[in-house]
Amino acid sequence: MNAAVRAVVRMGIYVKAKVYFVYEGYQGMVDGGDNIVEVSWESVSSILQVGGTVIGSARCKAFRTREGRLQAAYNLVQRGITNLCVIGGDGSLTGANLFREEWSGLLEELAQKGKIDEEAVKKYAYLNIVGMVGSIDNDFCGTDMTIGTDSALHRIIEVVDAIMTTAQSHQRTFVLEVMGRHCGYLALVSALACGADWVFIPEYPPEEGWEDLMCVKLSENRARKKRLNIIIVAEGAIDCHNKAITSEKVKDLVVQRLGFDTRVTILGHVQRGGTPSAFDRILASRMGVEAVLALLEATPDTPACVVSLSGNQAVRLPLMECVQMTQEVQKAMDEGRFVEAVRLRGRSFENNLNTYKLLSHKRPDAELPKTNFNVAVLNVGAPAAGMNAAVRAAVRVGITEGHKMFAVIDGFEGFARGKIKEISWGDVGGWTGQGGSILGTKRTLPAKYLEKIADQMRTNNINALMVIGGFEAYLGLLELSAAREKYDEFCVPMVMVPATVSNNVPGSDFSIGADTALNTITDTCDRIKQSASGTKRRVFIIETMGGYCGYLANMGALAAGADAAYIFEEQFDIRELQANVEHLTEKMKTSIQRGLVLRNENSNENYTTDFIYQLYSEEGKGVFDCRKNVLGHMQQGGAPSPFDRNFGTKISAKAMQWISKKLKETYRKEEGKVFANTDDSVCLLGMRRRNLVFQPVAELKNETDFVHRIPKEQWWLKLRPLMKILAKYKTSYDVSDSGQLEHVAMHSPKEAETGAI
């Protein structure tokens, strides 16, 4: 929430508006006085890395009465405030909408009572409202992610990872209770992200006789040499008769039926606390700026809106449509229409549920189809957190679809050397939380091994390839498809899933591993900023990875609240460096006496990190001193973030389903083999704005700058001005990309297949 507060304040001041804090939620608005104060630029300094909200929040009985709202209206009119930005859940937003509808009536009443004059009634005739959804359960319809959800998932995953090590040692079963009274999002996504054995959520109660099914599943897992079981229960979990399923009940069941050593852990308010994740900070900063733009453009006729995220796109939606749809879900659940409830939650939720069902329960061998196709999976490029989750999903979906799955060790180099083996369902258990690449990965390209790789494809009768990796994986697929003329072995469906910390693969807004790296950078910047709090006036210069791609430097700067980010995509000269130094010198005169500057490793061959450090040191003499830090390979390591586990799992499952479809299409019965030589049989699966799309790698060639290994156009460059505005630079903000008011789309079941994340 603090990132949103900061963005609203700074964007507001940037557009020359007066900005006020209302402390303690609606209670503060009703009480007035010192609860409503004008704020300055510095008021929101250093709050980006703080959890909770600095302006306080409170449930307010008074605001639910007309008298309370009358008092609130009076307090706002006194200060000439007619634009409200509300950050909260559906209760807060519904209250805001009611307040807006009553506004003119409230002013009339105040005038009748002689509290304000007719002049004021005319001058402040309309109240504009824009909402941002801050709720950890992600229970608000119309928005893919609410502010706070990703951070709550970070807390849950940290706990699950810690519990897994102890459960592993003691061969225990753990029942974890997570928040979500009416919405199972946190339970579902954390189950997906840690590969839990069973999950209970309110929207999808287990069928009759679930007790037996669950116990069979748990004992089967133990029989497969799995030393631990994890069961996740949402606090609002119910069975199909609307009776509560509690964590204690689940524990007793496991102990009585199976005699397993079982423990319950209730996560409670841990989930609401802690430092916000990089994703949440960037999301909230984007939403905050969008909210100010929406207020500026609001007219008496536009409905109150919420700014939200759909895929990777900021959108505006009518507030009441979202609220009504959110209430519809609850109604559907109360009436036992659970299929409907899941559908109303939106396609992202539905996708999560379907993927979880696909990956957690292995069907008995007898029930599995047999396709006689062999599919190989390999990792290419540098390691990225989340690769293992992607491999696990690919292997399990492949087995479910009836294929024989093969794992290639050490990328194309290992492939050429015949390092390839069949991999089973159980082999990939527990992989989601592992960082790096378990299969091993190499940067080597296939061109010099074509002959040997073709031999291996023939020997092992490989009918399709799935490559998980970065820019090398993309180049590798281009080389393999070019070699099709010479080698028939490469005439098979091939798909690439982007995984690299640099996020420099054409055809996708995100790649697996970038979120984890971004969190590492953000955490480090937080610590570095804190180290400066004792010493006055210090500027830090931090070098990030990314090759020529400025994604990590730019987004890291946005998430850490940096003063500048030097990137290759936006050329800079000595004048700009000079201006940055002057800007920091000015900043040191205020109460904020430290600076943070990020530099992408290849942003400029002459203005190196050392050069910038020396320049700043010399120019800042007597005003500030300088330190530099090269983050290096810590950006490639670490346990994958919830986003990377989830993204990796879903995108990889989808890629595997595409392979199955292509295998059916390209199988030639008369010859008894797969033959695919068209461009559309070598694809990259990427996230583009709102959808997951398969794009032939041949078509992506035109979009690629091969010299610098980056896409020619990158979506995040549009967020550059955002970072500059929040760091107090004069710049022009391109509003063409800001959301127009849309309606909440009820998606048809068909649309779920086109794929949202």
Image (cartoon, rainbow, N blue to C red):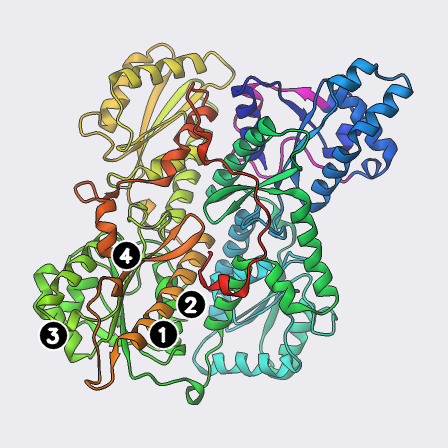
Q: Residues within 10 Å of mark 1 (few under 14, many from 20)?
A: many
Q: Which numbered circle lies on residue 430?
A: 2
Q: Residues within 10 Å of mark 3 (few under 14, many from 20)?
A: some
* Mark 1 and mark 4 residues within 8 Å of each other at the beta carbon: no
N-terminal of the pair, mark 1 or mark 3, is 1
Residue 148: within the magenta?
no
Q: Which numbered circle lies on residue 469?
A: 4
Q: Residue at x 62, y 30 (%)?
A: 298
Label 1: which secondary element:
helix
In the picture, measured across the screen, residue 691 lies left or right of residue 378, that is right
N-terminal of the pair, mark 3 or mark 2, is 2
Q: Amino acid at mark 4?
A: Gly
How far apart are the two marked residues, 3 and 2, measured between alpha carbons? 33 Å
**Please, what is the dominant secondary structure of the magenta stretch?**
loop
Which residue was labeled with disc 3? 455
Does the image show residue 378?
no
Q: Amino acid at mark 3?
A: Asp
x and y percentages locating residue 505 in the rendered image: 28, 49
N-terminal of the pair, mark 2 or mark 1, is 1
Label 4: which secondary element:
strand
N-terminal of the pair, mark 4 or mark 3, is 3
Q: Quadrant of residue 238?
A: bottom right
Q: Amino acid at mark 2?
A: Gly
Label 3: which secondary element:
helix
Q: Which numbered circle lies on residue 398?
A: 1
Residue 45: within the magenta?
yes
How far apart are the two marked residues, 1 and 4, measured between alpha carbons? 19 Å
| Image height of 329 relative to 568, above or below | below
How far apart are the two marked residues, 4 and 3, measured between alpha carbons? 23 Å
In the picture, measured across the screen, residue 24 lies left or right of residue 537, that is right
Span highlighted in magenta in the image:
36-59
